[in-house]
Image (cartoon, rainbow, N blue to C red):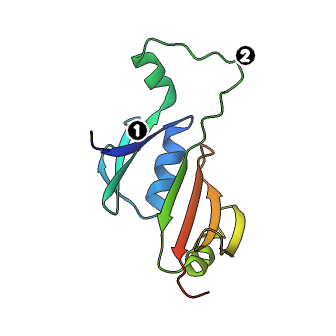
Amino acid sequence: MNLTHTRLLVEDYQECYRFYKFLGFHCTWGDETSNYAQFQVGNTLLAIFDKNQMLDDLNEKKDETAKKPLNEVVLIFAVEDVDEIYESLKSKVSFLTKPHDRKDWGIRVAHFRDPNGTLIEINKNITNW
């Protein structure tokens, strides 16, 4: 088996579509109204899909009273300069962490979420401590 892409099931498809377009990813399939889109992100694909449509396709119903299971996805993006990306996005994105070094991880890192709540990490490997 080969991993082909990561698909996020999202609550607000249009808002997430605009978000990933804003980040500069090229949409290779779909548009703002298609309820499914794929974005080229480096050498891989990131897909977003309307969660309710996916449940319909599976013949499952969304239970509004049930507790949501913890199903956290973290998207990891390598960048050339964490601080530069942070500065360019901070007026439009609410960062959870400012750029900081994680010596135990070997990276400089910052975190934010997309409109669906998906955790996003930007990082750069740091070789000289």
Looking at the image, residue 127 sits to the left or right of residue 21; the answer is: right
Q: Nearer the viewer, residue 22 or 116?
A: 116
Instruction: Find numbered disc 1 in the image and state the secondary structure of the residue it sits on.
Output: loop
Tell me the kind of residue under disc 1. Thr
- The image position of residue 125, as x and y in percent, is 51, 76
Q: Are marks 1 and 2 in contact (CB under 8 Å)?
A: no
Disc 2 target residue: 65
- The image position of residue 33, as x and y in percent, is 40, 38
Looking at the image, residue 23 sits to the left or right of residue 63; the answer is: left
Q: Tag 1: Cα neighbours inside 10 Å, few (<14), some, or many (≥20)?
A: few
Tell me the kind of residue under disc 2. Thr
x 61%, y 68%: residue: 105
- The image position of residue 97, as x and y in percent, is 72, 65
Instruction: Find numbered disc 2 in the image and state the secondary structure of the residue it sits on.
Output: loop
Q: Quadrant of the C terminus?
A: bottom right
x 42%, y 64%: residue: 24
Q: CA distance from mark 1 to mark 2?
A: 28 Å
x 32%, y 44%: residue: 3
Is 75 placed above or below 78 here? above
Of callouts 1 and 2, the N-terminal one: 1
Examine the rendering and report whether any part of residue 92 can be seen: no
Q: Nearer the viewer, residue 24 or 84?
A: 84
Q: Quadrant of the N terminus?
A: top left
Is 84 placed above or below 6 here? below
- The image position of residue 30, as x and y in percent, is 32, 43
Discs 1/2, front: 2
Disc 1 target residue: 33
Q: How many marks?
A: 2
Q: Tag 2: Cα neighbours inside 10 Å, few (<14), some, or many (≥20)?
A: few
Looking at the image, residue 59 sits to the left or right of residue 102; the answer is: left
